[in-house]
Image (spheres, helix red, strand yellow):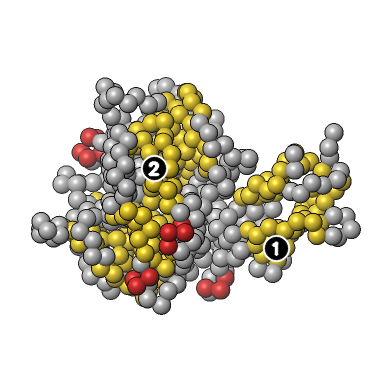
Amino acid sequence: MKRIIFILWLGFISNANSQGLNHNWLLGYLVNPYLPYSPSADATLQFTKINYSIYGVSRLMKFSATQANISDSLGNILFYSNGGWIADATGDTMVNGSGLSPSVFSANNNDLGFLPPSMQIALPFPDSNNVYILFHQTSEPLESNSNELYYSIIDMKQNNGKGVVTQKNLIAFQDTILFGIHACKHANGRDWWIVTLRDSSDIAIKILLTPTGISQVDTQHLNVPIHHNNYFQPMCFSPDGHRFAYIVNTSTGNMQAPWKRNLRLFDFDRCTGKFSNGLNFDLNDSFPGIGISFSPNSQFLYASQFLQVSQFDSKASNIFGSRQFVALYDSFYDVGVTDFAHLYLAANGKIYISSSGTTISLHEMNLADSAGIKCDLVQHAFQTPCFVFHSHVNHPNYYLGCDSTLGCPCLSATSLTENGQHDFRFRVYPNPVVNNFVNIGYILPQNKSGILKLYDVNGKQLYTQGLPPWSNEQSIKLPKLANGIYNLRIESGGYFMCRNVVVMYE
């Protein structure tokens, strides 16, 4: 098979290096090559904590909607999947990576990938630096649900670092489940909760993944009206792990109002895995919608219907009454209708929105933590160098730390050190500083914002900058400094950590 070949570089270049497990979104949909518009074959949208770059590539794998991928801590892609097979970083089929989720549906959809969103999710295996787990599902002959949840194990140490699928198509459980798999870090900061929904019920199915593997499969009645698969059921956890939301689209059979949409919102206990305080809102929309996302600070919940995007304030006393319409489709057409489909909260803190058909454009929400139209949703904000169809990538919050206040001990090496101090994993680069720019990497305490301070050798504070609770990477332009050694101090949650930084002009 062909390796990836880079063929185009576009703008939007960041000053910071791309770093993080969730810093790549792969684009590209196989369509009629005789259409008047002829873009490059595929593209990669690569994020930093403040910006993104986009470049065209030639890639064997195509995507309809569902996509799982994961990168290393430096932002280098490790592997990715469209539901039918797993590719390694070179774009070739990973060893033993073909034939995922065996079914007639899977065999017929390998070329374009699976259409329902969030049918797979890639996670680091707890307490391992090299092993990953991919949860995945398929459709049955009527394409209405799945009868099992599969998982496969990938060891990235093997095959010269390209990885090998060491175990494939193992069955986590058998049940009739809706399309969609989502995950949230356990309150211990190490394990994972994996969640899906049982069809034609009010039941959530939860898996607990620990260093020994799947240690628990549990069910819970959500005490809301039943959900069933007349259409895709978009779902998501809030970045802080405290909330879970999903949308139910139901066909009414009424030509005047063919669809009924309900938004469900729950509190989530990361320690016990229990959902509580379920709310059910009738959205009164006549068209379906397949996009949902929380804002980076977890306060605002966004839900798309093909012609509009709504915002809800999850901290309001009347959450449904807080609804504001932050965008109405402006009728723009590139090679297709640029309406609103899937919502993706990216590593740079912005929300990106695809459309329901084949387009070359993506929408961009620049200030998702702001109320109402101040969220700044820019329609068809930029054009990609390839075709995009329903595109969506399913990334959990990989950087969610432990939360001992919920009653679970912290078990993650990235959460608390043995002496009770927070391990910020504070990195500073380049060092010496280049052109007054310095990059920092860090992990803040659970649900805490932070502050960065710069001191000279006399202890005089020269610079300060706030760090949002969802962030773990920043590119900073320092004030004009004389040659010398300075101290950078990061503070959050009553803890702090310092690093020396050198300024040296030639």
**Amino acid under label 2?**
His
Residue placed at 55% from the left, 55% from the top?
Answer: 399
In the rendered image, which quarter is residue 274 located in? bottom left
Q: Amino acid at mark 1?
A: Glu
Q: Position of residue 333 (x, y in %)?
A: 30, 38
Give the quarter of the image for residue 278: bottom left
How packed is label 2: few (under 14 Cα within 10 Å), some, or many (20 or more)?
Answer: many
State the SS at label 1: strand
Quadrant where the C terminus sits is: top right
Which callout, 1 or 2, points at the residue further toward the start of the chain? 2
User: At 20% across and 38% down in the image, what residue appears?
Assistant: 104
Pick the front one: 313 or 72:
313
Residue 87 picture location, percent across and down: 42, 33
Drawn side of residue 200 relative to residue 4, left or right: left
Q: CA distance from mark 1 to mark 2?
A: 38 Å
Res. 491 mark: 1
Residue of label 2: 380
Q: Tell me where residue 455 appears, x and y as whole percent.
A: 81, 57
**Relative to residue 119, is residue 5 depicted above or below?**
above
* Residue 437's disc number: none
Q: Position of residue 229 (x, y in %)?
A: 21, 56
- Residue 416 falls in which quadrant of the image? bottom right
Q: Judging from the image, what secondary structure is the residue with disc 2 in?
A: strand
Which residue occupies 80% across, 50% down?
A: 500
